[in-house]
Amino acid sequence: MNLHTSITRIVLSFLLLAPVWTFAQERIIPNDKIPSAIQQYVKSHFPSHTIVLAELEVEGVSKEYEVKLNDKTELKFDKKFKVFKIDGTVALPESVIPEAIRQYVKKHYPNNFITDWEKEWKHQEVKLDNGIEIEFTLKGNFIRIDY
């Protein structure tokens, strides 16, 4: 076997195995090991709920925590324990929605409530109980509506 063939085999082996190394790894976190910042967030904003499942997902250098509550609400936190996504089936607590967004929904959709909220890199989005999704800037200024 010459050097070129050996290098080719090594490169091919790496390329075939690389996707396995980049898959996300998830593991369940026992309740007594859930980071205190996450526990405090849940106690503050969802005081009548309990955590039924907490998972840590690691993908490369990215780390996320997913928490499921007893009413099926799901919360996602970043590696600094900051919430960036909340999916619910009932009205989310007002305390988890930025004031400007709450006021916009109250004014334009007085008969509806927010079931989901997500903060992404350049914007925030909420979903109402009627299925309408509304996008806002990070500061809470209206951008657009998706029906």
Image (tube, grey):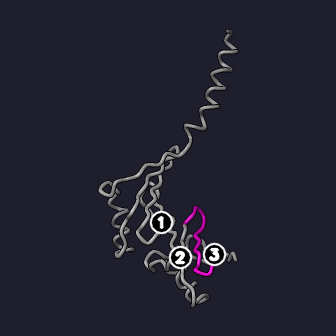
The amino acid marked with disc number 1 is Glu
Q: Amino acid at mark 2?
A: Thr
Callout in the foreground (1, 3):
1
Image side of residue 135 versus residue 92, left or right:
right
Mark 1 element type = strand
Of 128 and 37, the residue lying toward us: 128
Asked if the residue under mark 2 is in contact with the one under mark 1, i.e. CB atoms within 8 Å, the reply is no
Q: Residues within 10 Å of mark 1 (few under 14, many from 20)?
A: some
User: Marks 1/3: CA distance?
Assistant: 18 Å
Relative to residue 129, is residue 51 drawn left or right? left
**Relative height, residue 95 to residue 20 (above, below):** below
The region drawn magenta spans 119-132
What crowding class fits label 3: few (fewer than 14 Cα within 10 Å), some (14-19), or many (20 or more)?
some
The disc label shown at residue 115, or none: 2
Sequence-first tag of 1 and 2: 1
Q: Residues within 10 Å of mark 2 (few under 14, many from 20)?
A: many
Quadrant location, the C terminus: bottom right
Is the residue 41 above or below the residue 9 in the image? below
Provide residue 21's location: percent of width, then percent of height.
55, 37
Between 36 and 25, the residue placed more toward the observer is 25
- Label 3 sits on residue: 133
- Measuring from the top left, give residue 86's x and y in whole percent: 50, 68
Q: Amino acid at mark 3?
A: Glu
Image location of residue 85, percent across then percent down: 51, 65
- Residue name at image x 64 percent, y 78 percent: 132
Secondary structure beneath disc 3?
A: strand
Q: Please name the residue shown 68% across and 9% down the image.
A: 2
- Residue 74, which numbered label? 1
The Cα atoms of the two marked residues, 2 and 3, are separated by 10 Å
Q: How far is mark 1 from mark 2, CA to CA?
A: 11 Å
- Residue at point 50% right, 72% down? 88
